[in-house]
Image (cartoon, rainbow, N blue to C red):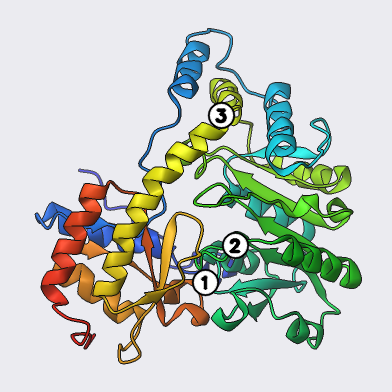
Amino acid sequence: MQKENKVCKTITPANRVGSVQEYYFSRKLKEVAEMNAAGKNVINLGVGSPDLPPSERTIETLCEHARQPNEHGYQPYVGIPELRKGFAGWYKKWYDVDLDPKTEIQPLIGSKEGILHISLAFLNPGDGVLVPNPGYPTYSSVSKLVEANLISYELKEGLGWQPDFEKLEKMDLSNVKLMWTNYPNMPTGANASMELYEKLVAFGKKHGIIICNDNPYSFILNEHPLSILSVPGAKDICIEMNSMSKAHNMPGWRMAMLASNAQFVQWVLKVKSNIDSGQFKPMQHAAVEALSAPKEWYDNMNRIYRSRRDLAGQIMHTLGCEYDEKQVGMFLWGKIPAEAKGSEAIADRVLYDANVFLTPGFIFGSQGERYIRISLCCKKETLEEALKRIKKIYVSPSNHKS
């Protein structure tokens, strides 16, 4: 009989493990899975995982190359030349940004990997890193894992969810090496502008702070995609990440990239090449095909998201939440009623009483506590069913005792 495997009591994890918690969605989706196993049929409006497929030609390209016997080996750490050229052409066509495919582009196994690689490449223990509040939780968790000094900067609705540069200038920035930005913004849906990007580039150059802009949402419900790298001289101080997860419906493929000056890219590659071994070649060829999508591809996708957002707006109104109609991206961010206890209380009530999973804003930082987020990554029929369920527990706008 096999003995029970017990961990030696003298063994403890590294200190960095204690600095972070398991990702909220990792924990919460386990609970949702348990509820579904019990027959609850929970509707997931929490996670931004596109339910639409990639283009038919993208999938065909993947299959065609996967049938080739010589395309299953290890691949270059810098990606195949066709992929780097594909990203460069995409940036030129849509953002009017010139990138050298040989030296200024690095494919990534998803942007989340890029956050880690950039942090490992540039941050020593104790270095300051500016992280947005609210913001993508991974910026904070990775900063903690590399033992950087995490410095939160607040984004407020009154300023359009943009950095308060006057407040930033009054901070002690002497030890700050890197600043995370994310425009178009998640979770707030605030759009990018050239004025904002110009301010960020100027701020980075003035203080010698690397500006890392995470830019996966610029094609979703947004008429004018922008890149921070279109600002003259931006490559000197900026790194931009972009992803195929959102705009090309390829979240499970883990296809992304970063772009910057050749030196920054080389430093990131130095880290990356010691951690992973490249990406599946047929997927890279398929990504090249996806990047060649015409304007009609994005237009058709956005027509679907627009109709879904109308229903998400009805859910927000049913919950008594207010939201900005000008939001972009694949979520809807709404301010909860003044009398509500908090975002988690509302999200839990909707989950347990209506079997609908929404994202409470507190997971994005203290500035998100009075907000909730709804994902548009599900069919209209699913959103209609979610609305129906929520209406049963929120009969009128005055019924918000959560």
- The residue under label 3 is which amino acid type? Ala
Q: Is residue 264 left or right of residue 307?
A: right
* Residue 219 point in image, percent of width and height: 56, 46
Q: Which is more toward the observer, 143 or 202? A: 202
- The residue under label 2 is which amino acid type? Asn
Residue drawn 53% across and 13% down?
65
Which numbered disc flags the more N-terminal residue, 2 or 3?
2
* Residue 298 point in image, percent of width and height: 51, 38
Q: Is 46 placed above or below 81 here?
A: below
Whether residue 152 is visible to the viewer of this picture, yes or no, is yes
Q: Mark 2, mark 1: which one is toward the viewer?
A: 2
Q: Mark 3, mark 1: which one is toward the viewer?
A: 3
* The N terminus lies in quadrant: top left
Q: CA distance from mark 2 to mark 1?
A: 35 Å
Q: Secondary structure at mark 3?
A: loop
Q: Secondary structure at mark 2?
A: loop
Q: Which mark is residue 74?
A: none
The residue wearing badge 2 is 191
Q: Which mark is residue 293?
A: 3
Residue drawn 83% across and 42% down?
266
